Image (cartoon, grey):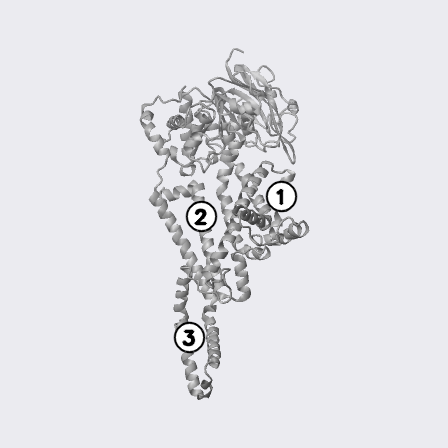
Amino acid sequence: MDHKLDDPDIQEQEIDIKEKVKRKSNLGRIIKYFGFRLLALFITVVIAIYILILIANMGGAVDNIRMGQIRESVGMTMMGMSSEMAEWPLERRREFEQTLVDQEIERLGLDQPFIIRSFYYLWDAITLDLGRAERMTSDAGSRRVQLIILERLPPTLMLMMSYFLLMFFMALFFALFLSRRYGSKLDRMVVLLAPSSAAPGWFYGIFLILIFAVVLGWLPYGGMVEAPPPRETHLYALSVIRHLILPVASLIMGAFFINVYNWRTFFLIYSSEDYVEMAKAKGLTDRSIERKYILRPTLPPIITSFALSMIVMWMGAVILEQIFNWPGLGRMLFEAIGLFDVPVIVGGNVIYAYLLAATVFVLDIIYAVLDPRVKVGIGSGGDD
Amino acid sequence: MAQDNLLVVENMHLYFKTRNGIVQAVDNVSFNLERGKSMVIVGESGCGKTSLGRAILRLLPENVCRYDGRCLLNGEDIMELSDEDFRKKIRWKKAALVPQSSMNSLNPVIKVSEQVAEPVLLHSLVDDKDEALKRAAAAFKKVGIPVDFLGRYPFELSGGMRQRVAIATSLITDPDFIVLDEPTSALDVLTQANIMNVLTRLKQQIDISFILITHDVSTSSEIADMAAIMYAGQIVEFTDARTFFGKPLHPYSERLMESVPTLEADDKLGYIPGQPPSLINPPTGCRFADRCNERFELCSQDPPEFVVEGGRMVKCWLYKESGERYVS
C-alpha cells in the first residue's frame, strides 16, 4: 500500500501544509512580550536602587552626620577668613556662621526632607548621573563617578564574558561526554570532585598565582596588561590574553565540577526519556540522537542553572579582581569601601543592578529561542 | 513450511545483569508470524513482554548480558546484522515502534511535523522536505488527526492526539511490522477505544502486521490474529486468537481470561493467587506450577512446547497426550 496521496482532500491541503508548519510568528506580540519583560526588570532595578539609597543614607540618618560636617567645615573656613572677623561680637559671628551653613545646606539641597530628596537621588541614579567621587579619581583624573565606572567596566565585562563563554561550552560538552560514560572512572572522579566548587574562584586564584607566577614564572601575577603597555595592537591583545588566563582559570575551577556534575545529571535524566528510545528505533545515528534528542531538550534547564550561577558570579568577582589586581568594577568597589567613598559605592552598585537586569533580559531571549513552550506562549499571547 | 512467514523468532534470549543477579527477561522464546497477520503478546506486568518487543527491535539497555537467538525477517536473520546495518536497513524501514507511554514519545522542543517526517528523510525515502511533509500529512489523515496539527509542538496536543501522532510516525515509512508496546495504557477508556478503532481500521486498510504488547486482554481481541501468552519470560501458549479467546488451553491463560471483566458475569472476577516468580533464578520446572491449581508430579520438570490440534502451541504437561488434557 502506498502512503502517497490518493485522497483528493490531501491534494488540496498540500499548499497550506508548508504555511501551517511555519507557524506565523507575530512580531508585534514578540515586541510586546519583551517590552513587558523589560518593564518588569526596570521596575525591579528601580526598587533595588531605591532600597540601596535608603540603606546608604541610613534612612536619612546620614544627614545629621553631613550637617555636622558642614558646620565643621564652615567653622574652619571662617577661621581662615580675615582676621578682623575675630573681633566681631560672638552674636554676630554666630549669625554669620549660620548664614554660611544655611547657604551650604541649601546648595546641597539638604533643606528639603530626606524622603523628597531620596527621589531626586533615585532619579539621578537611574539616569546614571552618579555625582562626584569624594576621594577616588579615574585614571584620567576625573572625579565624576560615571567616568570612573566607565573606565572600569570594560575589564570586568571582558573577564566575565571570557569566563561565561569558556565555562559554558567546556562544561556542557564535558557533561555530555560524561553522560555517555555514566559510571566510568572519570565520571565517578567528577562526582567526587564536585564539592571542590564549595570554595570560591579567588581561593584557587591564590594557589594558581603561587604555582604559575611565583614558582614557574610562566604567567604574570596580576594586572590586565604589561607595564609599559605594548604599542602594537596585536602585542597588546596578546598581553591581555596572558593576563586573562589565571583569573579566568581560577573562576572556572571554582565552578567547573559542580556544573559538570549538575548538567551530566540533567543529561542522564533526559536521555532516559521515551523519545530518545524512539529516536533510536527510528534509526537516527548516535550523534544526531545526542544533538537533537538529548542536548536540545536539556538546554532550557541547563541555561536556567547557569543563569543562577552567573548572577552570583557578578558579585563574586569583587575579591577575585582584588587578588589579581584586575582594574575592574569589583576592585573599584573594594577600594571605594576602603576609602568610605559613598558616591562610588552607590554608583558601583547601581551599575551592578543594571548588569544583572541585562543578564536576565538576555537569558529571557535565549530561553524563548530554545524552548518552544516559551516561544509559543509569546507568539499566541497565551490563548493557545 | 509452505506458509509465508514474516517474522520467525527462534530461541530468543535476553538477559539483564542487575545487582541482585541475572534477570532472565526473555528466556528461550520462539514463535512465527505469518505475513499479513497481527499478534498480541499478553501477560502480567514484569513477565518480559516489553523485553521481547525490545529484543526484536534491538532496543537494548546498557546492562544486557545475554542476547542471542535467531530472528528472521522475510527470511533474513536480522540478529546477524551489524548495528550500523541494522540501523540503516531495519530500523523504522522494516520495523517501527509505538512506545509504552506515548505521552513522552515526542521530543518537547521539536515540532510534530519534523518528528513525524524524520524517518522518511533519514532513510532517504523521499527527495526533499516538502515531499516528507506531504507524507506526514497523509499519515495524519490515516490516523485521523487534522493536518494543521503538523505545525504544533507536542505539548499542544492531548494524550490521545500524541498517541495518534506516534502511530502516524510508525506508519510513515511503510514498515513490515509495528511493535505497539501498550499503546493505550496511559489513556482514558474513551480514548483507548478511539485508538483501538484507529488500529482496527488501519489493519483493514493497509497491509501491515501489528505486534501488540498489552496486559489488557479485552481490547486486544479485535486486532490480533494470533495470541502469545507470556509468563515469566516464556511464551506458554501461542495460538490463533479466535480459538484462544474462546477456549484458552494453558491453565495460566484460563485464569487470565477469567480475570477479564465482562458485562454478563455476575459472580466475582477470577484471580490468580500469588505473584509471578522473580526472573532472577526462576523455578526449574514449570514456572507457573506454584500458582497452578492443576499441578501434578510432572510439573517439577520443565514442560516442552506441545503442539495440539489446530497447530496450537502450549507449554504445559497437561497436553502431553495428543492434545487432550491429561488430568481433568
Q: Position of residue B9 (x, y in %)?
A: 56, 20
In which quadrant will I find the N terminus of chain B? top right
Residue drawn at x 60%, y 46% as measured from the top left? A257
Circles 1 and 3: CB distance less than 8 Å?
A: no
SS for dot 1:
helix
Q: Amino acid at mark 2?
A: Val
Q: Amino acid at mark 1?
A: Val
SS for dot 2:
helix
Q: Which quadrant would residue B168 be assigned to in this image?
A: top left
Q: CA distance from mark 1 to mark 3?
A: 63 Å
Single out the mark in the foreground, 2 or 1: 2
Q: Name the residue that disc number 3 marks.
A: A104
* Residue A200 at least partly seen: no
Q: Which quadrant would residue A92 be assigned to in this image?
A: bottom left
Q: Name the residue that disc number 2 marks.
A: A362
Q: Name the residue that disc number 1 marks.
A: A190
